[in-house]
Amino acid sequence: MNRQKPIVIGHRGSAGEAPENTLASFALAVEQGADGIELDVQLTKDGEIVVCHDLTLDRTTNGSGYIGEKLWEDLKHLDAGSWFSEAFTGERIPLLRQVFDLLPRGFLINVEVKHAYEGKMEKALLALLREIDRWEDIVISSFDHKVIHRIKQAQPNAKVGVLYAANLIDHAAYARQLGVDVFSLHPYHQCIEQEDVRAAASAGLAVYPYTVNHTADYKRMIAADVTGIITDYPARLREFLAQ
Ligand code: G3P
Ligand code: MG
């Protein structure tokens, strides 16, 4: 991952232009020149890791109810595209494994763990990650810092990122006091300034603010010298960086 700063990370794929967290959205992010993507994961009742932002199916599919109460069999035929636009009718909820199969080696994949599922999510995730063996490409982040702490303790070569939406007094110090080796900070973009990024860089931390969609905010994040930018519009950001 030695690309030019800031790298372009497609939020939920290319969520501004395709239904979030679908294979179509991830493929579009690749096509638009993103260096990586961010996605969100949930766990089914039978232990399958699926890619979906919400705990429930209602907003982004034609199904309803909690994913954690469903079997993969119940989810795999749902439509996860038509809520966004008719052109994407037939898009499915992907398994995380299918996203790994789709994306090329060397492409950054930021897996955001939305819910711990009583510790079952991290166990299922680590089993899958050990099988696919792409530790260099994958960064696991979460607002649940206990989850990333446990993942890092169980798998020291895993890359973990601290996700947060607070303007911390000392961002790098917060990561340090977790007591495990953190790879990256993932702050809400309004909660990070140049001096925080500088301190993070000195501590060897990458900084990937989310979700940055407007020119003024691109400029602010670039001036702050962040490592990467998470955006719903990878093509727009790529074009801006080319100027
Ligand atoms: O990982 C960055 C960002 O996705 C966190 O918020 O709600 O969009 O998953 P959310
Ligand atoms: Mg997310």
Image (cartoon, grey):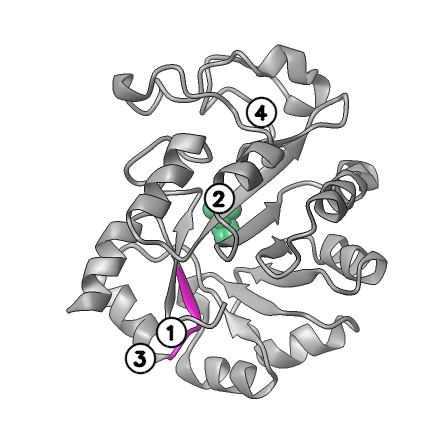
Residue 80 in the image: x percent, y percent?
44, 21
Please name the residue that numbered disc 1 is placed on.
5
Which amino acid, by three-letter code, is at mark 1?
Lys
124 with respect to 113 (left or right): right
Which amino acid, by three-letter code, is at mark 3?
Ala
Label located before the other in sequence (1 or 2): 1
| In the depicted structure, whether residue 5 falls above or below residue 208 | below
Residue 138 versus residue 62: which sits nearer the camera? 138
Q: Residues within 10 Å of mark 4 (few under 14, many from 20)?
A: some
Residue 85 in the image: x percent, y percent?
28, 22
Residue lying at the far front in this picture: please name it: 105
Please identify the dominant SS of the magenta region.
loop
Alpha carbon separation for disc pair 1 and 2: 21 Å
Quadrant in the rendering for residue 132: top right
Alpha carbon separation for disc pair 3 and 2: 30 Å
Residue 106 versus residue 24: which sits nearer the camera? 106
Please name the residue that numbered disc 4 is placed on.
56
Task: Give the magenta-colored segment's residue range.
Answer: 225-229
Which amino acid, by three-letter code, is at mark 4?
Thr
Quadrant in the rendering for residue 190: bottom left
Q: Which of marks 3 and 4 is in front?
A: 3
| In the depicted structure, whether residue 3 falls above or below residue 79 | below
Alpha carbon separation for disc pair 3 and 1: 11 Å
Q: Is residue 173 magenta?
A: no
Quadrant in the rendering for residue 203: bottom right
Which amino acid, by three-letter code, is at mark 2?
Leu
Q: Nearer the viewer, mark 4 or mark 1?
A: 1
Q: What element carries label 1?
A: loop
Residue 218 in the image: x percent, y percent?
28, 66
Name which residue lies at 45% across and 68% down.
191
